[in-house]
């Protein structure tokens, strides 16, 4: 008897599964691992690439153009002073004087004892700057200070005029970027949720100040639709407005898209009205004019910015949590990822029922592979085992060539979530997959 699928996943199950199936590994594991750093295997890379592509597609909109850029990872100190990060980018830190464990002071109750040693003897709370500093140049004494960027956004702001004068865009428009960011988090944890090196997908949307409120509303709605289009459970997503005391130094209004993780509702994406803070600061510090000219009023102004910023890794973790399922098939427990077909890392499996049928199925597989990348051929083990292998990595379809196939020129296609099978003409496999792999357009 089959049971309806459940999602009993925990952080431990997910971390172990990701390692076992080659999605994600602890970085430098053979040297004991580096806390807050992860490496991605083949399936993790494919999944992340699909999320990146889906994100870029999701930005397209009727209000204005979006252009892409890719900035340097290290920026000069002057830039980070101007942006406010040298002064303000910190978290409150506290140590237990008994066991020397370190905590983020805003994440624990200081009236209670240390969760590590059970004693209560705290240091003063002090601010810890989370930027990773480095020296640029041949020697430490003559080199200049640089910082690994803690967000991708500043590279966009400092290139605002370069983009404006080369990309044939006019306000309102957006500059989008995908790239690594680095934060020396006090307590990296929860797998990909809080890392020290992670990837962000950010869009800075430049608009007239009088339109900013409407644009903020527009992006709030649009960003939520993106998560729905990935198939993430709508009842586990919500928008939450920041309280005044939560706002970052640059923001006059921020909403978070939150997801209900097994460890509670947490931020997945931040949507912030940054006003003209960044462009004004960079203009002041660099001495370069970053205003634009409004033809209709014949005046110059510094545009406002609405920022949407999500971590690719945090999104990937969200998708893994949300898609994990366990059910019973033919008396056995199976687990699978119910990924939407357009984000699934492997799109289809191709199985000959027996070794004798290898050649014709391999030919079909080669033909499909030439049009649809990331499909797999598998000959080893029982068909049931081969299905489970693909289920576990979230492959939506498996095709099997059996003893009827030659006469009927058909194969069976088996769908991952329902395990239902039906026959399909061999020459219909490619059109079937092309249709099924279309992104959802919610
Ligand atoms: P948090 O409150 O969780 O620390 P934040 O408010 O500092 O997040 P932002 O500066 O708004 O985060 O960054 C935008 C997005 O980048 C976040 O919504 C999250 O998806 C991602 N992100 C931020 N810090 C990390 C991190 N340490 N590891 C993984 N992803 C991160």
Image (tube, grey):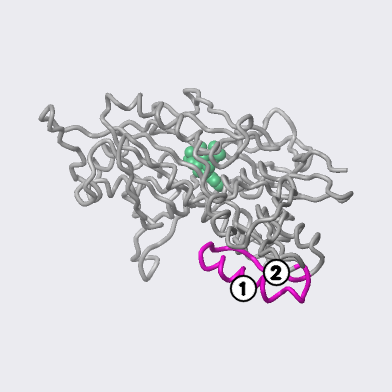
Which residue does the numbered mark 2 point to in the structure image? 406
For label 1, the crowd category at 10 Å Cα-Cα, with few meaning under 14, some 14 to 19 and many 20 or more, is: few
**Which image quadrant for residue 392?**
bottom right
For label 2, the crowd category at 10 Å Cα-Cα, with few meaning under 14, some 14 to 19 and many 20 or more, is: few
**Which image quadrant for residue 278?**
top left
Q: Nearer the viewer, residue 399 or 306?
A: 399
How far, Cα to Cα, is label 2 from label 1?
13 Å
Left or right, 244 with reference to 238: left
Quick one: label 2 or label 1, which is nearer the N terminus? 1
Residue in the image at 59% along x and 59% along y: 429
Residue 289 lies in the magenta-colored region:
no
Residues rendered magenta in the picture: 353-380
Picture layout, residue 296 above or below residue 169: above
State the image coordinates of residue 200 (x, y, percent, origin top left).
Answer: 47, 48
Which residue does the numbered mark 1 point to in the structure image? 363
Nearer the observer: mark 2 or 1; the answer is 2
Residue in the image at 29% along x and 26% along y: 211
State the image coordinates of residue 150 (x, y, percent, origin top left).
Answer: 45, 48
Picture layout, residue 255 above or below residue 196: above
Q: Which mark is residue 377?
A: none
Left or right, 87 with reference to 268: left
Most extreme residue toward the front is 407
Which image quadrant: the N terminus?
top right
């Amino acid at each position: 008897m089959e049971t309806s699928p459940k999602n009993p996943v925990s952080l431990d199950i997910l971390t172990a599964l990701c390692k076992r199936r080659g999605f994600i590994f602890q970085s430098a594991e053979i040297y004991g691992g580096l806390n807050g750093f992860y490496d991605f295997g083949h399936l993790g890379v494919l999944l992340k690439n699909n999320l990146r592509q889906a994100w870029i597609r999701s930005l397209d909109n009727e209000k204005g153009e979006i252009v892409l850029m890719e900035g340097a990872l290290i920026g000069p100190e002057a830039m980070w002073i101007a942006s406010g990060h040298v002064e303000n980018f910190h978290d409150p830190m506290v140590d237990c004087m008994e066991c020397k464990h370190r905590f983020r002071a805003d994440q624990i109750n200081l009236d209670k004892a240390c969760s590590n040693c059970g004693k209560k003897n705290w240091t003063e709370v002090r601010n810890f700057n989370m930027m990773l500093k480095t020296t640029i140049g041949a020697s430490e004494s003559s080199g200049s200070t640089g910082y690994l960027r803690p967000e991708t956004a500043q590279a966009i702001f400092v290139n605002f005029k370069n983009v404006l004068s080369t990309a044939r865009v006019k306000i309102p428009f957006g500059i989008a970027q995908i790239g690594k960011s680095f934060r020396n988090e006090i307590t990296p944890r929860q797998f990909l949720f809080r890392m020290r090196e992670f990837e962000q997908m950010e869009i800075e949307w430049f608009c007239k100040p009088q339109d900013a409120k409407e644009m903020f509303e527009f992006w709030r709605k649009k960003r939520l639709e993106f998560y729905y289009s990935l198939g993430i459970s709508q009842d586990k997503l919500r928008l939450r407005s920041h309280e005044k005391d939560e706002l970052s130094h640059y923001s006059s209004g921020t909403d978070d898209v939150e997801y209900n993780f097994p460890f509670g509702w947490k931020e997945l994406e931040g949507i912030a009205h940054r006003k003209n803070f960044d462009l004004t600061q960079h203009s002041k510090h660099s001495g370069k004019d970053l205003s634009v000219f409004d033809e209709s009023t014949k005046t110059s102004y510094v545009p406002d910015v609405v920022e949407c910023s999500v971590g690719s890794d945090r999104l990937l973790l969200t998708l893994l949590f949300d898609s994990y399922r366990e059910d019973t098939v033919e008396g056995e427990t199976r687990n699978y990822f119910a990924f939407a077909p357009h984000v699934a890392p492997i799109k289809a499996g191709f199985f000959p029922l027996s070794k004798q049928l290898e050649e014709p199925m391999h030919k079909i597989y080669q033909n499909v592979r030439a049009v649809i990348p990331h499909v797999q051929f598998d000959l080893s083990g029982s068909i049931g085992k081969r299905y489970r292998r693909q289920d576990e990595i979230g492959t939506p379809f498996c095709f099997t060539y059996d003893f009827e196939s030659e006469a009927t020129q058909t194969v069976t296609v088996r769908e991952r979530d329902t395990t239902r099978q039906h026959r399909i003409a061999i020459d219909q496999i490619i059109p079937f997959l092309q249709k099924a792999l279309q992104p959802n357009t919610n």
